[in-house]
Image (spheres, helix red, strand yellow):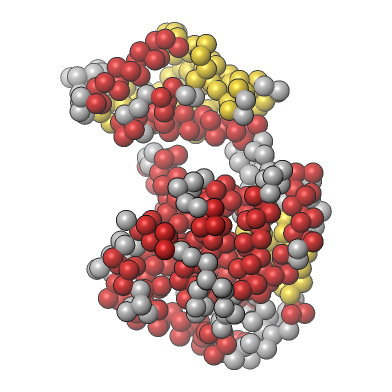
Amino acid sequence: MWLTKTSKLVVVGMGLATWLFIGSAGIGQAGQSQIVIAYPPVSNLYMQQRQLWMQNRLLEDLSEALVPIKWPRQLTLMAVECGFLANGQPNANAFYNPQQHSITLCYEFADYLFQMFSQQTQLPQNQQGLLFSGALMFTILHEAGHAVIGEFNIPAIGREEDAADQFATIAFVADPNGAQLLMGPLWWFQLSSQQSKNFLGFDTRDAIRLYSDEHGVDEQRFYNISCLLYGSNPSAHQDVIASGMLTPERAPRCASEYQKIRRSWELLLTQKGS
Amino acid sequence: MKRLFLACLSIWALIALPGVAVAESDEAAIVRTIMESVNAFANFPQTKDHQTVARFYSKDYFGIQDGAVMSRSLLDKQLADMEKMLKDEIPMTIKASASNVRAESSGVMGWATYDVSIDWDSSGLPIVKGNEKCTSLLRKAGTQWQIQHDHCSSSKGQPEKAT
Ligand SMILES: [Zn+2]
């Protein structure tokens, strides 16, 4: 069972990342000044969180995901209270806006991830925190992927959501601790696929809603990320197959899939980022 | 990615601080209660535990379905019977889902309107299949919302007899 894999999670001092694929593409000289940080006002509900985020300069640190890229124009990273959806649920979202050249992280989204992982009471709290961190990092990097495609006008052939997931995954596996942290988004997609099945009961209407969404269904995102993780270093990640996170049928193609996707991103970033 | 990681871990830690986590709004909690109650019923053949369904209903619950009354004691009896059938390995499939859930609340009282679609097939019993329009009254007990009363009527598709 793949869930048992996370029991191996331990906090290893997070070595400074060499974000290899961007570093090797020579785009590492970007100025911090290209990233603008914003904390727009919020209602009472998020007053305390906003204050704590500002005091701790959290967005400034999150922007580390964006700094290695030489953006063609200013990009804003902001934390926003996104309110409620029509069904009464909080609007737990994170998104890139190409018109505003901005990435928005909703406080509600951090809450949503917090609720999800803090309910995994079978895990010690530090592991819940690691999974949460991995999932939030993945989200920021996924949005960074959208922003790269949008800001550099990169032609995304195929589904842009898949490209953004690939961008984030490649950034993770380039980091020495990335494989462990990838367990965060993997858990997230696993839990969320269970939840949608429970809530929806999967009749035709639900199937249409899921399959017509611009994102792959959670299971596909799960296996695509696993495949790239395994493909980045098959001999080091045999446990990905052993734990059932990847089928033996797909595994043999993952190394070439990883190489191809990584090369494509490097090529695009080298061309666009110089 | 160290700063990125540490920022995310800090966000975890500060949401975990007492008083920082945002309480779910009452309306959102009511919507969740309705969805979970229907969901618990759909999962009954797997959980085989009537408490997973019964816990959403108050002690003084009563419901009306197309004119027929369901009391709390009747509900408990029906769920207990189903549990026994399931434990006796009598085949049963339940598909049930709630949609269009809208909720309002005032103090400890809340209400919700929603649609339920159900398809319940168990060998030897009539097939229950159809779509219902429901209204529920809920009461807040501590931090939990419980269904105190509901009223459902078939919107289309009548229960049919197994042949
Ligand atoms: Zn996306």
Q: As rendered, which of B58 and A222 lies closer to the eye?
A: B58
Place of residue B29 in the rendered image (x, y in percent of width and height, measured from the top left): 60, 33
Query: Residue A58: horizontal and vertical position, in percent?
Result: 72, 64
User: Dividing the picture into quarters, in which one does residue B118 lie?
Assistant: top left
**Residue at the farthest right position:** A41
Work out whether B118 lies above or below B59: below
Relative to A62, is B153 on the left or the right? left
Q: Is residue B136 left or right of residue B21?
A: left
Tally the marks. 0
Q: Residue at x 69, y 44 (%)?
A: B18
**Which residue lies at the image location 34% right of the left edge and 33% below the top edge?**
B47
Q: Quadrant of the N terminus of chain A?
A: bottom left
Q: Does A48 sit above or below residue B123?
A: below
Image coordinates of residue A79 in percent, x first then y, are 72, 59
Is residue B95 at all visible to an observer of this figure? Answer: no
Q: What residue is shown at x 77% (from left), y 72% (from top)?
A: A36
